[in-house]
């Protein structure tokens, strides 16, 4: 794959920090990467499609996979853990505020949520208004890029006394870029509906994200372009009344699709992929609503 993977992580991930991270000593997992499927149909080739057909396909990769190459033991505040060699760590994005609070910077990787290790630990941490966030993790820093972790801090600490990074014995780790998603995740643009209309039949295309063959619902996909957040909604619908065929969707996650004909009665349409999905970091986002009831 013609890509400088390390450059992708640095150049594309940094603008996402402010978009994905909260306040305090917060971190957020490095988003996955979508890349064009090399087995997809030939570009600029017109073909007839029907409801449910895949128009464009991308494969999902773990942007970076990191594992410890030596055991590691540490203790910060009330938390202690022995971590075995071979343990997988999560690459994360860190906002400037966390860097300032911890007093360290570099390539940062985090372990498991301390709350989930045991019910006792979860109870000990208390609720949202305690000294810790809802997620608390040991995070490890390679400050000089030598593939050895040399500092650690506690992500999710609210108390200033627990926020500073500590030195740890240099611990080697292995890093592999763009590894296939273990769940076989894929992003597809499919034919959703063919709509018969007096002013001209419409074609609806929809983005589907799947893992292990099952759909993963989302409201939009977030990406970063030119240092700014972009939201891609999943549905794309032609409107022949306003734009007669051929119609073009010129930015479907960086891809471009031409629709030259739609015959809803026959249940078919002619489409061509002019440009595949762009290789990029992405994050599916689901909108959640919280209702607060006030009784008088």
Image: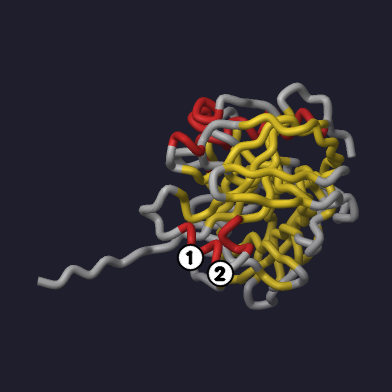
Compared to residue 134, the image places residue 217 above or below, namely: below
Give the quarter of the figure containing the N terminus: top right
**Front-lying residue, 93 or 48:** 93
**Front-lying residue, 184 or 76:** 76
Q: Is residue 219 left or right of residue 35?
A: left
Q: Position of residue 281 (x, y in %)?
A: 68, 42
Which residue lies at the image location 84% right of the left edge and 53% below the top edge?
180
Q: Which residue is mark 2?
A: 119
Q: Is residue 69 left or right of residue 280?
A: right
Q: Is residue 69 left or right of residue 57?
A: right
Tell me which corner region of the image, top left, top right, bottom left or bottom right, holds residue 284.
Answer: bottom right
Which residue lies at the image location 62% right of the left edge and 53% below the top edge?
245
Q: Is residue 209 left or right of residue 294?
A: right
**Front-lying residue, 264 or 292:** 292
Q: Are marks 1 and 2 in contact (CB under 8 Å)?
A: yes
Q: Position of residue 280 (x, y in %)?
A: 71, 41
Give the quarter of the figure containing the C terminus: bottom left
Residue 248 appearing in the image: no
Residue 27 appearing in the image: yes
Which residue lies at the image location 48% right of the left edge and 61% below the top edge?
124
Task: Say how many tags the image has.
Answer: 2
Q: CA distance from mark 1 to mark 2?
A: 6 Å
Compared to residue 110, the image places residue 108 above or below, namely: above
Q: Secondary structure at mark 2?
A: helix
Q: Position of residue 91 (x, y in %)?
A: 70, 42
Q: Which residue is mark 1?
A: 123
Q: Secondary structure at mark 1?
A: helix
Compared to residue 152, the image places residue 128 above or below, namely: below
């Amino acid at each position: 794959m013609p890509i400088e993977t390390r450059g992708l992580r640095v150049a594309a991930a940094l603008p996402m920090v402010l978009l994905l991270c909260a306040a305090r000593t917060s971190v957020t997992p490095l988003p996955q990467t979508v890349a064009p499927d090399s087995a997809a149909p030939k570009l600029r080739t017109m073909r007839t499609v029907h409801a449910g057909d895949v128009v464009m396909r991308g494969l999902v990769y773990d942007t970076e996979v990191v594992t410890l190459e030596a055991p590691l033991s540490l203790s910060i505040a009330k938390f202690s853990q022995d971590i075995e060699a071979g343990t997988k760590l999560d690459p994360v994005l860190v906002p400037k505020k966390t860097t300032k609070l911890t007093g360290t910077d570099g390539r940062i990787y985090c372990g498991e949520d301390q709350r989930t290790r045991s019910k006792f630990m979860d109870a000990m941490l208390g609720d949202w208004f305690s000294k810790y966030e809802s997620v608390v993790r040991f995070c490890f820093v390679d400050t000089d890029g030598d593939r050895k972790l040399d500092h650690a801090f506690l992500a999710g600490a609210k108390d200033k006394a627990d926020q500073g990074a500590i030195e740890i014995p240099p611990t080697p780790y292995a890093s592999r870029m763009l590894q296939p998603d273990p769940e076989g995740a894929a992003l597809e643009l499919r034919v959703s509906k063919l709509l018969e209309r007096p002013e001209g039949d419409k074609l609806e295309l929809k983005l589907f994200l799947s893992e292990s063959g099952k759909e993963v619902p989302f409201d939009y996909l977030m990406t970063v372009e030119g240092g700014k957040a972009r939201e891609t909604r999943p549905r794309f619908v032609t409107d022949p009344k306003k734009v007669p065929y051929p119609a073009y969707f010129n930015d479907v996650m960086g891809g471009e699709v031409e629709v030259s004909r739609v015959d809803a009665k026959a249940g078919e349409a002619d489409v061509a992929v002019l440009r595949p999905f762009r290789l990029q970091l992405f994050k599916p986002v689901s909108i959640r609503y919280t209702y607060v009831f006030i009784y008088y």
